[in-house]
Image (cartoon, helix red, strand yellow):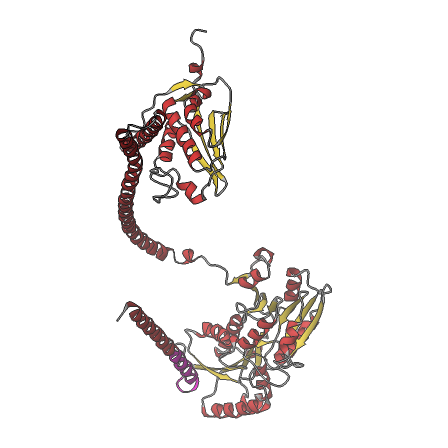
């Protein structure tokens, strides 16, 4: 089995294991939900068994277990009942999804049967408006003389009226409508309209009434609404998309449309966010973190906690008439950091004490010891791995360097052999001609001898280059015989070489005619100039211009040689000073072994100067180098 096939099988196996794991998680969640529901009626257990007499409390929820506020309310209730001898049972009206009369009648019959078959309760807690409305409608036949504590009621006036009912008290869910509207105006000074999203449920109608009653102090903007009492969920998105940037939106309730179709809160919110391009605010904690920007919101946890504290006092013996309805709701400013960033709002713009959700948290502060322990372990292993990796890289580089060295040596030997063979063949041929033919004219003999002499000089130069680079590689450096001379003295040494090229190229020489002295080895400087000029001539066509410029700069002298030759690419220009590098390394290339420019750089740098190349492919090349001036005492006449 090949590696690819094995990898595919492993990946598929991991995916299958992941799917099994997800399936088991789903099954576990379903079982937990079933056990939680059965817990309420089949085998209820006390939150504590401290030896006190057991008290029974029923929580009547207006909605269903999947409603976002339910678990927040339950957490608040159980935070108070924990450690107490309280049996908590739960019933769900599910009136948000099924608000019709048939559902309420079915619930009434079911609850009647359960209340008849179970022991009496000591207190009843209701969650939200529909549950309190149901209790008031059936108080005489289902809950006679049973203390009732409500929470989550939006209609403040209606809630406060329960102070006249001797068996009812509770906590008002007073939305911070005015504060939230003022906040929206403050954070969006460019907006001229606030649009409320509502439906025809009791919660939606009550919140919409409060919305318009809070208009005082909002003269800078217009208040309007989009109610699902007038739209279906199919038409609703089109209305949302029509809202412009001058509007900000406040979500009150959007569960049931005009046709009676209902959506879960998360589905309703998703529908709104997909079709809304303006900031969305809310009055409830649920939805924050899932698309709602923020607001001064109700904490359903605190609502549940306050209601449970009242119920606990009642079952402990305090008369319910002594506990008035609480009309102050513990609300807080809460915002989603992701939505703040989306609409360009800063945390500094928010009210003091605001709670920010999804804000980047410092994991280090929360898990300092763990971070240090893991970091230490990771650092140790990292050092080990880095050390091993560096060792591997060094070995690879050494191997690559050795291979490159062997390649360069082979190439060098091949090139040197070729460069020696070509002039030697010529020398041999002309020598045999001179020896074998006595009839050659004196002019022909001199021409042959001149050619032999030129080839001999080329071989001598080649041997010098090889010896120089060998000396450099051995670390002995170049031996310089430094003396002070003028710029003109340096160029007089290459005049014979220039004269040989006068008939083949156009020369233009511009030298500074100053008596300023420079510190150079005249022999080595002649080698530099001849090498650079030779390259300029070899890589330029006959009749092209070669310019030589010499000038004095602030701390030395600069010489530049410019040709109109074939030029180089930037990649070649970067490598031009490398040993054995030749732009064209083929046997048909211009003669040379790729050492000249490397030796030239070594000579220039040995003088304390710099050398660089500027080249355009197809246009030509300029090579410039510098070297220092002579010391002041060398320029002065000692007899003056």
Q: Is residue 319 magenta?
A: no
Relative to 73, does residue 483 appear above or below in the rendering? above
How many numbered dots are placed on residues in this image?
0
Whether residue 512 appears in this view of the structure is yes
| Nearest to the observer: residue 428 or residue 27 | 428
Relative to 626, does residue 619 appear above or below in the rendering? below
* Quadrant in the picture for residue 578: top left
| Nearest to the observer: residue 403 or residue 76 | 403
The boundaries of the magenta stretch are: 26-43
| Nearest to the observer: residue 440 or residue 624 | 440
**Could you tell whether 527 is left or right of 504 in the image?**
left
Magenta portion: prevailing SS class = helix
**Could you tell whether 434 is left or right of 19 in the image?**
left
Q: Residue furthest front?
A: 439
Where residue 229 sits in the image (x, y, percent)?
Answer: 66, 81
Q: Residue furthest right?
A: 219
Where residue 507 sits in the image (x, y, percent)?
Answer: 49, 29
Relative to 34, does residue 306 appear above or below in the rendering? above
């Amino acid at each position: 089995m090949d590696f690819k096939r094995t990898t595919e099988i492993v990946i598929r196996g991991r995916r299958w294991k992941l799917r099994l794991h997800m399936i088991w998680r789903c099954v576990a969640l379903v079982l937990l939900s079933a056990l939680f529901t059965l817990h309420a009626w089949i085998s209820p257990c006390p939150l504590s068994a401290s030896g006190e007499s057991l008290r029974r409390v029923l929580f009547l929820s207006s909605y269903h277990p999947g409603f976002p506020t339910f678990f927040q309310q339950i957490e608040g209730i159980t935070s108070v009942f924990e450690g107490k001898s309280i049996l908590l049972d739960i019933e769900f009206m599910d009136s948000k999804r099924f608000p019709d009369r048939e559902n309420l009648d079915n619930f009434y019959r079911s609850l009647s049967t359960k209340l008849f078959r179970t022991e009496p309760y000591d207190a009843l807690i209701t969650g939200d408006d529909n549950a309190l409305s149901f209790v008031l409608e059936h108080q005489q036949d289902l809950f006679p003389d049973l203390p009732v504590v409500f929470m989550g009621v939006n209609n403040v006036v209606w809630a406060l009226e329960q102070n006249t009912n001797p068996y009812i008290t509770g906590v008002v869910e007073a939305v911070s409508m005015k504060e939230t509207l003022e906040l929206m105006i403050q954070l969006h000074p460019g907006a001229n309209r606030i649009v409320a999203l509502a439906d025809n449920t009791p919660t939606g109608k009550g919140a919409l009434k409060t919305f318009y009653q809070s208009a005082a102090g909002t003269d800078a903007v217009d208040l309007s609404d989009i109610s699902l009492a007038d739209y279906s969920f199919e038409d609703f998105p089109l209305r949302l998309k029509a809202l412009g940037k001058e509007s900000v939106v406040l979500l009150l309730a959007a569960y049931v449309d005009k046709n009676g179709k209902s959506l879960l809160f998360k589905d309703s919110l998703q529908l709104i966010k997909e079709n809304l391009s303006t900031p969305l605010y809310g009055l409830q904690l649920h939805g924050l973190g899932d698309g709602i920007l923020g607001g001064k919101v109700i904490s359903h946890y605190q609502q549940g906690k306050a209601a449970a504290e009242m119920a606990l006092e009642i079952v402990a013996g305090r008369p319910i008439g002594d506990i008035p309805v609480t009309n102050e709701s513990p609300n807080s400013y809460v915002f989603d950091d992701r939505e703040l960033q989306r609409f360009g709002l800063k945390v500094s713009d928010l009210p003091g004490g605001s709670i920010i959700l999804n804000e980047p948290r410092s994991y280090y502060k929360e898990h300092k010891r763990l971070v240090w322990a893991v970091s230490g372990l990771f650092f140790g292993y990292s050092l080990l791995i880095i050390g091993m990796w560096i060792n591997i890289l060094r070995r690879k580089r050494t191997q690559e360097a050795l291979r490159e060295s062997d390649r360069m040596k082979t190439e060098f030997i091949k090139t040197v052999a070729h460069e020696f063979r070509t002039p030697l063949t010529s020398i041999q041929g002309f020598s045999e001609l001179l020896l074998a033919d006595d009839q050659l004219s004196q002019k022909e003999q001199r021409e042959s001898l001149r050619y032999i002499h030129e080839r001999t000089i080329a071989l001598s130069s080649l041997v010098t280059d090889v010896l120089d680079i060998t000396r450099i590689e051995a670390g002995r450096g170049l031996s310089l015989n430094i003396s002070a001379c003028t710029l003109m003295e340096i160029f007089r040494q290459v005049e014979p070489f220039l004269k040989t090229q006068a008939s083949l190229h156009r020369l233009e020489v511009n030298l500074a005619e100053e008596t300023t002295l420079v510190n150079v080895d005249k022999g080595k400087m002649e080698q530099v100039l001849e090498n650079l000029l030779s390259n300029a001539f070899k890589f330029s066509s006959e009749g092209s211009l070669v310019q030589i410029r010499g000038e004095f700069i602030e701390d030395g002298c600069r010489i530049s040689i410019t040709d109109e030759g074939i030029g180089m690419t930037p990649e070649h220009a970067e490598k031009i000073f490398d040993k054995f590098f030749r732009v064209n390394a083929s046997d048909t290339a211009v003669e040379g072994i790729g050492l000249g420019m490397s030796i030239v750089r070594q000579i220039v740098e040995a003088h304390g100067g710099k050398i660089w190349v500027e080249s355009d492919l197809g246009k030509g090349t300029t090579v410039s180098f510098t070297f220092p001036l002579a010391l002041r005492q060398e320029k002065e006449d000692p007899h003056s």
